[in-house]
Amino acid sequence: MLISGNFNIIRNHIFYNFGTTSGIINLKRTGLLSAYEKIMIQNVLETYISNNKINLENICRSENIILKEMPDTDYDNALGQFVLQGSDGNPTIYLNTKQPVKNQWYCIARQLGHYFLDHGSVERETQKVIQENKRYHDKSAHRFALAILNKC
């Protein structure tokens, strides 16, 4: 599935328009990109963007990142998790497939942020963890995800 969209920063809010899918997600502004984040985002976009669209599954495949369904989502309704070295030795993104598709794509992009920005493995990302967004690497992965999903 190809992801594309329009990116508009309006004062204290970031709006992501998912194109043909319904709804606009309103996300609190998470600050400016660091120089390192800009470089990594640019490298990813230059490597993986095609016809102004980005295919997250192709990025995972090219980077040998395994996508797996997240276990025990009924327990904490976690959206996703990145594990640097999964059970088969490859980086693994665990995804809550019970979430709406647009949330799944955001989750994949966010977990790719952890991967490309060298954050290592991260804890299960529950809605609470994402909303609090207090740790630097969580904010950084969030900014990465927005840039990847919105850059055309």
Image (spheres, rainbow, N blue to C red):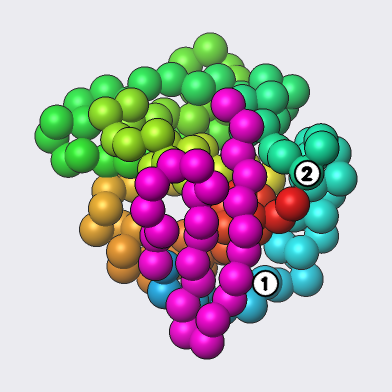
Q: Residue at x 30, y 35 (%)?
A: 99
Q: Which residues are magenta?
A: 1-26
Question: In this figure, what is the number of numbered marks?
Answer: 2
Nearer to us of marks 1 and 2 is 2
State whether residue 91 is above or below residue 40: above
SS category of the residue bearing label 1? loop
* Quarter residue 27 falls in: bottom left
SS category of the residue bearing label 2? loop
Judged left or right of residue 137, residue 50 is: right
Identify residue type, mark 1. Answer: Leu
Judged left or right of residue 69, residue 65 is: right
Residue lying farthest top? 88
- Whole-angstrom CA distance, mark 1 to mark 2, is 21 Å
Residue 8 position, x and y percent, is 60, 71
Residue 137 in view of the camera: no
Residue lying farthest left? 75
Compare residues 63 and 107 and report the one nearer the observer. Answer: 107
State whether residue 66 is above or below residue 143: above
Mark 2 Cα shell of 10 Å, populated few (<14), some (14-19), many (≥20): few
Residue lying farthest bottom? 11
Q: Residue at x 50, y 71 (%)?
A: 14
Q: Earlier in the sequence, mark 1 or mark 2?
A: 1
* Quarter residue 41 falls in: bottom right
State whether residue 33 is above or below residue 24: below
Q: What residue is pinned by disc 1?
A: 33
Label drawn at residue 52: 2
Identify residue type, mark 2. Answer: Asn
Label drawn at residue 2: none
Q: Residue at x 60, y 39 (%)?
A: 3
Residue 50 position, x and y percent, is 81, 35
13 is within the stretch colored magenta: yes
